[in-house]
Image (cartoon, coloured by chain):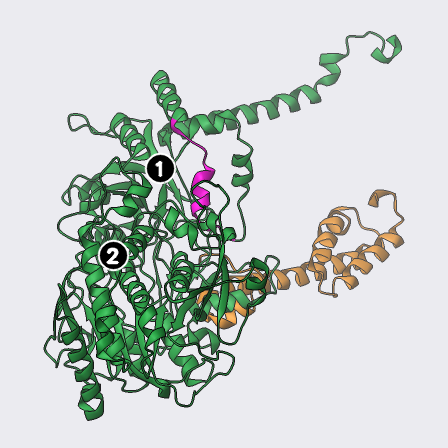
Amino acid sequence: MGSTCSKIHFSFFKLSVDFLSVSRNLKWGPDPHVENACLSVGCNSVEKKIYVHLNYTFPCVRLLNATHQIGCQSSLSGNVGVLHELESEENLDWVLTSGPNPPYMVILESRLFTRSIMMKLKEGSGRVAGVVVVAPNTNPPEGFSPHTACPNDNSGRSKNYDPTLAHCNATVWNPLGNGLAYEEFDFPIFSVKDDNDTRVIRQCYQDHNRRVNGSNPQFPLCAMQLRSSMSAVTNTATCKRRNDINFSLTPDRVCDELGDFNIWASSRPMNTTTKGHKEFESVVIAAARMDSRSFFFDIAPGAESTASGIVTLLAAAHALRRATQEAPPNRTILYTFFQGETFDYIGSSRMVYDMENNQFPLDLDNIHSVLEVGLHSDSKLWLHSDPVSRKNSSVKEEVEKLVNGLKSASAGLNVSVDEPDVSQPLPPSSFQRFLLARPIPGVVIGNYRSSFTNRYYESMYDNAEYLNVSYPENMTSEEQLEHFPETVKTLTEVATLVARALYVQAGGNETQLANITADPQIVNQMLYSFLVRANNSWLQQLVPTDFTNHLADRPTNFYVGVIQYFSEPTTLVQYMLANMTGSVVNVTQEDCQKKIPNILYTYMWVQGAAPPNSTEREGFCVRSTVHRSIAVSPAFELHEYTTSNYSTWTESVWKPITGRIFLVASHDLEMLTLGVGITVLLTSLVLTYVISSKADILFSSGREPTSATY
Amino acid sequence: MNLERLPNEEKLGLCRKYYLIGFAFLPFLWLVNVVWFFQEAFIKPAYSEQLQIKSYVKRSALGLLVWVTVLTTWITIFQRFRAEWGEVGDYISFTIPLGTP
């Protein structure tokens, strides 16, 4: 057996790459564990011979709100269990009752990552040490959504709908939603990519833990340790209180609020230093959301649920740039991108709160109407409106005008728009938070009639593959930026539709409409930046030099994250929007940077492109009306952590998140080793005592004392 | 310090001192007193100061017992109910364990 072990260990050793590559992706708690220091300088080889570290793991983490906690947690030192690969749901019996070596670390194929299996594992958690979900390389055809069936039900319009409309009683928006992402598990759940790591895990399992001919597997067995130890517990009120207690010896933070920034820009410059109501100002809000999530931390591709809305609205803003400058409509168009909407509308509720409390350059009276771009990626669009506020005749009239504007704008475009049943409730959207404040006319655009057509809503599969944004294998990044997938054409059409409708809604002259057309090139570049990689030659030109390092070579992570960290999409949207709506002014870099802040405009120096025969980039100054406004729930401003009016989501702080596999000996062998050790210790103690008590006889042989020989 | 070498009066003085200082919320001093003077009080052959030493040792032991009872009861109650007390429990805690209610 010994030789097998060392062979396995040797092959593991080769595959264990620098552990720190994991740590870069993850946020550490404020208390880095000593293990890190040990690993960064390279531990002794015994550690390496025993353990194989998993490099690309995505944990599920703990989130808390006013009433409860969700997500996963391991014990402080990590949960250890014998690996068991689940083959089918019937196979669960081995894990939950019959297997002889509990607790088990269960490996699940993604097709088995279902509510029914996870709930059984949760209930049998005494025998379950943790779960590893192997993420597939292709999306599951049957669909998967770990979100709830009725997203953001408690924070939206349901509050003042009557029972027939409230709580998805009229229509279930996300029928595939199994609510797994809102369950609490007291064991760690990690996702691993189907690559080298998974092969090592599977090999170890095959070699040691598989039952051969019905007999139980023999020791040593392959085991795994997963550590995702969370500091926060119970609910937001508890963890915020513990954050504030500074009496203890180690005043650690235990949780942080979710939140970031909303991004907005106006089609006409607006004085941002005076807050509250603006006389003679009437704005049309064009909204989209900027965040998404999945079951696992750090994977939130949000392709259809988020990226398509952002791209469409940015492309529409770009299409409107010339028309709004040359023939400005009566009303101002306000492009707004809300952050944290997945978690009970953090961004929109804060903007509404700021407007109500004169903390925003506009107030609710300045809002003429709202047009929100929701989930979409195909040419069949549905225009959703709110049945309750439509009972107000003036609102009804404005909504109908907006709907008709959209319908007539679709003429000549390759998109069809339609209205669902007018008594149908409003789908989950940022607009709901405006309606909670007062009846405002507005429409939400989506590609669904009464339930999402997206089969992967808020999951790790809502990705580029789902939107058919794929490029031939051997293309370089440059060629990919020039290659238009089919989705790009659709989104361009939708962007044109949105732009024209916004222009009409703002009171613009219809003769201008023919000049308002979205640019497929821009749509493609933006889509590519969000869904494939942000670090591309196009986006590099549009950002300041010091931001270049932050452009990632992977799809954007749309998870909002805690307020201390910038969320990826926020900054990308900010730079894109500045370049889409702003204009280049001819000033030096120094002057450009001096002009910040300004009451009307923001200035930013971006690095630009390098001319053909040079490596030096030629930067330029972009003047725009792009602003950031804080997107932190009003609950934290008001210190009301148990409120049901606002989002109260917080994310726990955690110790380093690690995963490793190793071989364990049988319990008997461990006990034998311990017993032998204790016996040796006791024997030596007795021996020493005997020898020392009989020292006279043993060591004095009648000779002179030894000192005399010195 | 070796008790054997002290004259009996000084032993008594020492025992009394430990007993009295113990009242300054120092139960461990009583514990030391009990352990240290146990032999003097109960095992050594009788001498004139022994009776007083005996009484100080007994009283120290009694005080110690009261402390042990009170602390054990409180610690048991505190550990059992800290989570249920919620806010109050957090405010009277010196260190709050991470990741547990």
In the rendered image, which residue does mark 1 sit on?
A: A224
Give the residue type that dot 2 points to. Pro
State the residue at coordinates (50%, 25%): A45
- The shade of chain B is orange
Classify the position of the C terminus of chain A by image quarter.
Answer: top right
Classify the position of the N terminus of chain A by image quarter.
Answer: top left
The span picked out in magenta is: A15-29
Which of labels 2 and 1 is toward the front? 2
Q: Chain of mark 1?
A: A
Query: Is A688 one of the magenta-colored residues?
Result: no
Residues A41 and A272: in front is A272
Q: Chain of mark 2?
A: A
Give the residue type that dot 1 points to. Met
- For the question of whether residue A288 can be seen, the reply is yes
In this view, A667 is above or below A9: below
Instruction: Indicate left or right for A400 with A278 as reference.
Output: left
Query: How much space separates mark 2 and mark 1, taking CA atoms?
Result: 49 Å
In the rendered image, which residue does mark 2 sit on?
A: A520
